[in-house]
Image (cartoon, grey):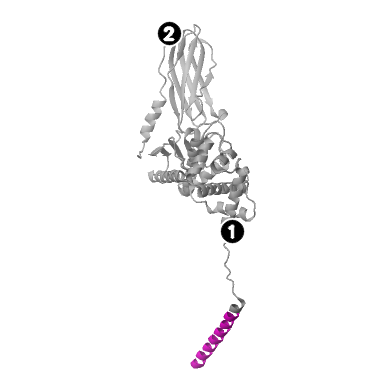
Amino acid sequence: MIKRVSLLALVVCLSLVLLSPSLVQARSGLTILDSSVEAEFPFNLSFNLSAESDVNITDIRLHYAVDQVSFAQVTSEAYIEFVPSTIVEAGWTWNMRKTGGLPPGANVEYWWTVEDAEGNRVETTPVRVQFDDTRYSWGSLTEGNITIYWYEEDESFAQEIMSAAQQALARLAENTGAQLEKPAKIYIYANAQDLMGAMIYPQEWTGGAAFSRYGTIAIGIAPDNLYWGKRAIAHELAHLVIHQLTLNPYSGLPVWLDEGLAMNAEGTLEPGFATYLNQAIDENSLISVRSLSSPFSTDAKQARLSYAQSYSLVEFLISNYGQEKMLELLNTFKQGSSYGKALEKVYGFDMDGLDTLWQEYVTEQNRPTAVAVVWMHPALIGVLSALAVVLLIWLGLTIKRRKQRQG
């Protein structure tokens, strides 16, 4: 099902999530007068409270929890400093410059607890607030488990991106068996500058990011760079799917596998990356699988080679051992297995064994096709040479006769 959400509907939804918690009154007269939250995306969430009691209010605490995938329920608590009084107005600001930001559309649930000098205690009803990037008027498009948000260009632009996303999911499922387990939100910013304005301390080269625990992708795609945008969407969406499938509290994936699957989701390897790979094969300067298991080099050339090799490693495993083995490998990593033990369990070789087999594979693929040489008996060669001489003499005589006739 595909649906378009109007700006008016978004405004209504935003108004609903920003409603104050139900006002609560204790039997003693301890009362929550008002509660509100203000968002300044992407930097701050400011929470405010006013309360009164027959005696001094002595303790106010804000409790909040972020809606994200985790292995335990995590609730944060902010102790509010204020001067005790029978009527109190208090507030607390979540400064994300200090703690790290949230992606657009993240949900935060919060509530207050208030106590007075007689030990009376009030707890408000939890309220969910959506931390939206309200700088833009977003449209939305939903198909299956994917919702795309964008604010420039017409709906055909979003349709093209949705088509690329669905194709990437199909390609990933065909190669690995991995499926999108939870809904994904993709925020399309009109350019890289707008995207960086939605992030806390972004790198200047940032083009997109997958927030796996939130099921969110944020990316900058200019209309004249749609080819890159489609591949980038496929890449980041693959990260989201694979991280959903393999998330565990013990260990992550080797970088070559994570990035190789994302590169494969884009489609065939781009010529620029293929050039780096072929050159490294010719020069015998391939990076080892052990090295590719750790974060890639910051050197641009080495980084591009690392991505190209990662693509090739995954292509080697899928082509030679099939989809079922790749899915088994991912499920083994989900159990918290180490890199070497996961490979040994599924394929029967460790990282060094994979390195040897893969290098033999790509070297053979890159070897120039040999020109076939037919062996001939020396006597046959002599006969053929004599025939060639006779043929040349005949051609010469024929040409001479034609000239004489013309003369």
CA gap, disc 1 to disc 2?
Answer: 85 Å
Find the magenta span and give its range. 382-407
Of the numbered discs in the image, which one, if any, rests on residue 391? none
Q: Residue at x 50, y 39 (%)?
A: 242
Residue depicted at 64% across the width and 53% down the height: 284
Name which residue type carries label 1: Arg
Q: Nearer the viewer, residue 12 or 228?
A: 228
Q: Residues within 10 Å of mark 1 (few under 14, many from 20)?
A: few
Q: Residue at x 53, y 37 (%)?
A: 332
| Position in image of residue 8 (x %, y %) | 36, 33
Q: Name the kind of residue labelled 2 in the image.
A: Gly
- Dot 2 falls on a residue whose secondary structure is loop
Chief secondary structure of the magenta span?
A: helix
Q: Nearer the viewer, mark 1 or mark 2?
A: 1
Q: Residues within 10 Å of mark 2 (few under 14, many from 20)?
A: few
The image quarter containing residue 253 is top right
Q: Position of residue 174 (x, y in %)?
A: 45, 45
Residue 173 covered by magenta stretch: no
Q: Which is more toward the observer, 198 or 160?
A: 160
Of the numbered discs 1 and 2, the one sitting upstream in the chain is 2
The spot of residue 310 in percent (x, y) is: 56, 46
Decide: is 367 above or below 63: below
| Front in this rendered view, residue 246 or 386 | 386
Give residue 367's mark. 1
In the rendering, at what x and y percent does residue 43 appear?
Answer: 52, 30
The reply to whether the magenta stretch includes residue 387 is yes
Quadrant for the N terminus, please.
top left
Task: Write down the residue under mark 2.
Answer: 29
Element under label 1? Answer: loop
Dots 1 and 2: beta carbons under 8 Å?
Answer: no
Q: Is residue 297 visible?
A: no
298 over 126 or under it: above or below: below
